[in-house]
Image (cartoon, grey):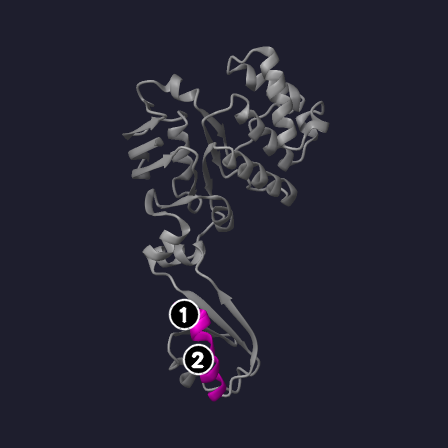
Amino acid sequence: MNILEVSNLSKKFGNVEALKRVSFSIKEGELYGLLGPNGAGKTTTINIISTISQPDTGYVKINGTDLKNNSMECKKSIGVVPQEISLYNELSAYDNLMFWGSLYSLNYEDLQNKIDETLSLMGLSDRKKDKIKTYSGGMKRRINIASALLHSPKILFMDEPTVGIDPQSRNLIFDVLEELHQNGMTIIYTTHYMEEAERLCDRIGIIDHGNIIAEGTLDELRETTKAEESIKIHSENSEEFNVEKIKQIKNCLDISNGVITFSSKNSGRDLPLILTELNNAKVGIQQIEIQKVNLETIFLNLTGRKLRD
């Protein structure tokens, strides 16, 4: 069952087309990654499906309810972790959560229990009475996430939740997301970090310049793009070997700064053949590096460039 359906969303800001007929759907319990560079349209998409802004065209259905016709009902089903921290610095973490939780009409006792539960989940029970202004950036982010979980949403929207935070908080957020996902929560996660999408997401939509340019599991994206592995040979005598002769070796892509790069559909099969050819060309080998097909190579294959910040 699709818990979220997004169809033909378009949005302009002046003459800039932020979204161009974006469509995708997400199944209940899925962790879906929206991957793309800054300015690609990720935040605009999240703002629309979380009721913050209106599209110029298209529609959104959340848990079977049309967002345009019944936004209040949709809001009950969603939790939003915005890119910007939304907390009151002069209040304690507990009082911040009490304030945000009261907006969901939870009764006092249930809210207290939920606050204790989310603080424990985010590893901040011992700091709940401290003012937010004493928190690190990563700790503030964790409280921001806690506030989005107080009403037990069916869908959690997370917009670049790990930007600018410390490694400890980042890893804890990953652990929390994996636990929530394992317990059946639907999560939409936007990021421009390849390794996050690879680690966390069941399916990934790659967005660039307001378009979804590819979508699927990591294996499906690999198959769709026909991206290949790369084999990098770091030589120890680059000033001695014949560059033109090496370029004639099958699937040689590049020779730069003593590093010879080959493409390969099967590195285990191709590497011995490459090493034999390089040995014949009297190339001294210092290091061998094999890069499997990952999101970075897929994005490069789709767009012709690396994922820009």
Q: Residues within 10 Å of mark 2 (few under 14, many from 20)?
A: some
Q: Main secondary structure of the magenta part?
A: helix
Q: Are marks 2 and 1 in contact (CB under 8 Å)?
A: no
Residue that appears at 67% across and 22% down: 92
Please tell me which residue is depicted at 38% across the width and 56% down the height of the picture: 222
Alpha-carbon neighbours of circle 1 within 10 Å: few (<14), some, or many (≥20)? many
Question: As shown in the figure, which amino acid type bears the numbered disc 1?
Answer: Ser
Q: Secondary structure at mark 2?
A: helix
> Circle 2 sits on which residue?
273
Q: Along the line of sight, which residue is nearer the eye, 241 or 119?
A: 119
Estimate the x, y position of residue 41 in percent, counting from the top left.
38, 40
Drawn side of residue 274 relative to residue 93, left or right: left
Kindly indicate the quadrant of the structure image that contains residue 139. Answer: top right
Q: Which residues are magenta?
A: 262-281
| Percent coordinates x, y for residue 91 in the rendering | 66, 20
Give the structural element (helix, strand or loop) at label 1: strand
* For residue 100, above or below residue 31: above
- Residue 43's place in the image compared with 116, above or below, is below
**Left or right: where does residue 107 sit relative to residue 3?**
right
Q: Quadrant of the N terminus?
A: top left
Q: Considering only vertical position in the picture, is 109 above or below 87?
A: above
Vertical relation: 100 (above or below) 268: above
Say if residue 16 shows up in the picture: no
Of 237 and 73, nearer the camera is 73
Q: In the rendering, at what x and y percent does residue 27 appear?
A: 37, 35
Mark 2–mark 1 distance (CA, rounded to whole Å): 13 Å
- Along the polypeptide, which appears first: circle 2 or circle 1? 1
Q: Which residue is mark 1?
A: 263
| Residue 250 drawn in magenta | no
**Residue 7, quarter of the rendered image:** top left
